[in-house]
Image: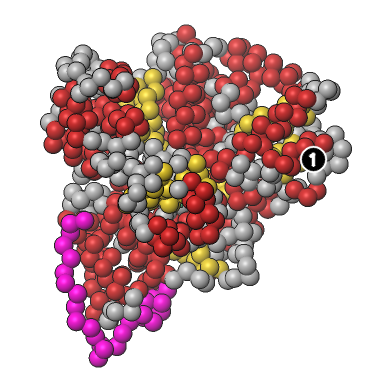
Amino acid sequence: MNLEDLAEIAEQSVEAEKSQRHCVRVCMAASCQSSGAGAVLEGLRQHAKQDADGGVHVKPVGCMGLCSAGPLVSVDATESKTEVMYKDVKPDDTEELYAGLDGAPLERLRCPTDIPFFACQQRIVLKNSGIIDPENLDDYIAAGGYSSLVRAVTEMTPADVLREVKQSGLRGRGGGGYPAGLKWSTVAMAPEPHKFVICNADEGDPGAFMDRAVLESDPHRVLEGMALAGYAIGAEHAYVYIRAEYPLAVERLKKAIKQATKKGLLGRRISDTTFNFEIEIRLGAGAFVCGEETALMASIQGLRGQPRPRPPYPAEEGLWECPTLINNVETLANIPSILARGGDWFKGIGTETSTGTKVFALAGRIAHSGLIEVPMGIRLREIVEQIGGGIPDGRRFKAVQTGGPSGGCLPEEHLDMSVEYDTLRSAGSIMGSGGMIVMDETSSMVDVARYFMEFCMTESCGKCVPCRAGTVQMHELLDKIAEGRATQADLDLLEELCDVVQATSLCGLGQTAPNPVLSTLRYFRHEYDEKLRPESERLPPLPVVTGDH
Amino acid sequence: MLMDRPRTERTAVVAPPDDDKRWKIIDVTMRRNGYAGHALIETLHAVQSCFGYLEDRSLRYVAMSLQLPLSKVYGVATFYHLFTLKPQGEHTCVICTGTACYIKGSRGLVSAIEARYGVNPGQTTEDNALSVLSARCIGSCGVAPTVVLDGDVLGEQTPDSLIAELQEIV
Ligand SMILES: Cc1cc2nc3c(=O)[nH]c(=O)nc-3n(C[C@H](O)[C@H](O)[C@H](O)COP(=O)(O)O)c2cc1C
Ligand code: FES
């Protein structure tokens, strides 16, 4: 495949689209499938088949974002026509919906597309999501796919590719926010002949589903990003480490790798050049700590997923002791667009230190749950109140949790903060991978802190003592506080333990496990205080729990 | 930490425990990975999807085939939450206890199942009809709280709707 071949495929598909009367897209990502999208797709296909006039193309697509209103159907989302979107479509509705294609749209199920949920988004990573058929390579190519890769391997040097990525200012979307260009350069400069690229698709943060949606909706974008990374750093082998809880994403990735390899866009001699790039899939097995890069590499090698101290960093000594580039799904999904439009274009979006956009998974007590992509630097309030549509049932906003078990809860007074890596950190939370859980007044903050501590306790790999034993002790104390059995001394001990575990744990899991406690203490200390008993009513201490669990 | 490098091809060294056809699938997985030690997790996934759980003789067979100490195989099998050494009931119900589902009431689902069937996550009913498991986010947080019933994701569950679903099959 060269650039002309790609252009020809794109042209054919534009022609094909022109000859259609209507294009009906049905979201077939996991959430909509669970609400019955499969039967809706089948129903619409039947109507199209029986339609004597023909010319109606019904196609399965990836996530359209507004998961809480699924199954979603979008009609004629093309440049020349006005899109009509439907929500909560049931199989029984398909006849009426189909009849409305040429007549008046079915108002009963209509989902306005000019609401802030859609209008305030800016899509780079999710550009094709909900538009293309994720199982159809030609659809991706028609949307400009693989042209960045083919142009890079035929017309650019690896150093050129690296320069664009550096110029873009892109920072890792997996949580840490490490500059991608810097990481790529380190691996590129390593003299060893064998290098690896790893795509981290473990997405362990409970309450986050950005990576899942990208993989299910636009798998080729991630593969293209990986191949570009391989070209830039000089690697020929790559792994996608993906959690087994995402069977649909795994299936689509496998299919995508097969399709791209068949067309010579992956595998040996890509675009008839000397560049080879092979991608293998490795399944996780339900261990949160395997999202941590050194644990992840151990897991790929068939070992228990236990982290090791860094340095050496994976960029110097990674998989099978070879220099290894490890990036998150969303980080890699940005790469094809950066190469297509240039690092300067990307840098122009977002803020000075946090460039580009960020995908967030909005969930919890919020009117519109789903997937959104917004420019960095947006106000938190805009996300919660406008895009998310505020808190349902007339309740009051209490906090938004970002960063999962490593993050924190931000209260109302921080809603006007700009969403950037550094501002979130200074407010006691983190950007994290993009999970955003909104809580209303019914959530107890002590309970939320206990929930995350329980999570860290069960997910601690057990290698280092501060994390293994510390999380158990902190959980015990939080339990005591939540149940009203604790005194001021217990709270003091909890705070002390937070410091110790943060300072002395081996990996990010333990180092950040105290964050939910610290941030709720910072903003909601009164909730802790209310639960404390006066010293005079102090209960006898419980037996000490050891670190075994 | 070094096991063997990616492509150290070998051939089979032992024969399967019996003539059950499912061992063929396990063998294919190991062969595709050249019987290398790093294929352990992949192989255990194959065993679990074929046999439903990891029984002792499967672990032994995998250990011998990949030439790994049984202790290492056992260590890996017990480290990862998804692997189970116990057979599962006829039906499985996985309750998501991830953050979004927790905030939207997954605790109520767990209590409802306990009240109706007397089992908690990680347990199987006495008549072996239902195994209840928990998961940390299945990525459908937009329709929280979620459960996975025999592989199908069900969103926006309430204690009543879930019990109604379960009563249809159990
Ligand atoms: C406990 C723990 C869990 C992590 N989980 C993930 C994860 O699920 N996905 C991810 O991309 N990064 C995760 N990370 C971050 C990775 O270690 C690593 O920094 C990241 O994959 C690098 O990619 P990036 O630079 O593109 O962000 C986790 C880190 C820790 C400490
Ligand atoms: S928290 Fe339950 S599906 Fe994500």
The magenta stretch spans which residues? A523-549
Q: Residue at x 62, y 24 (%)?
A: A139
- Tell me residue A428's x, y (percent): 40, 63
Quarter placement of the N terminus of chain A: top right
Under mark 1, the amino acid is Glu
Residue for point 25% across, 41% down: B85
Of residues A463 and A320, the one drawn nearer to the viewer in this rendering? A463
The quarter holding residue B40 reads: top left
Residue A524 forms part of the magenta stretch:
yes
- B133 over A281 or under it: above or below: below
Kindly identify the residue that appears in the image at 19 percent across and 18 percent down: B15
Q: Residues within 10 Å of mark 1 (few under 14, many from 20)?
A: few
What colour scheme was applied to this rendering of the protein? secondary structure
- Residue A43 x, y percent position in the rendering: 70, 33
Q: Nearer the viewer, residue A356 or A442?
A: A442
Q: What residue is disc 1 on?
A: A96
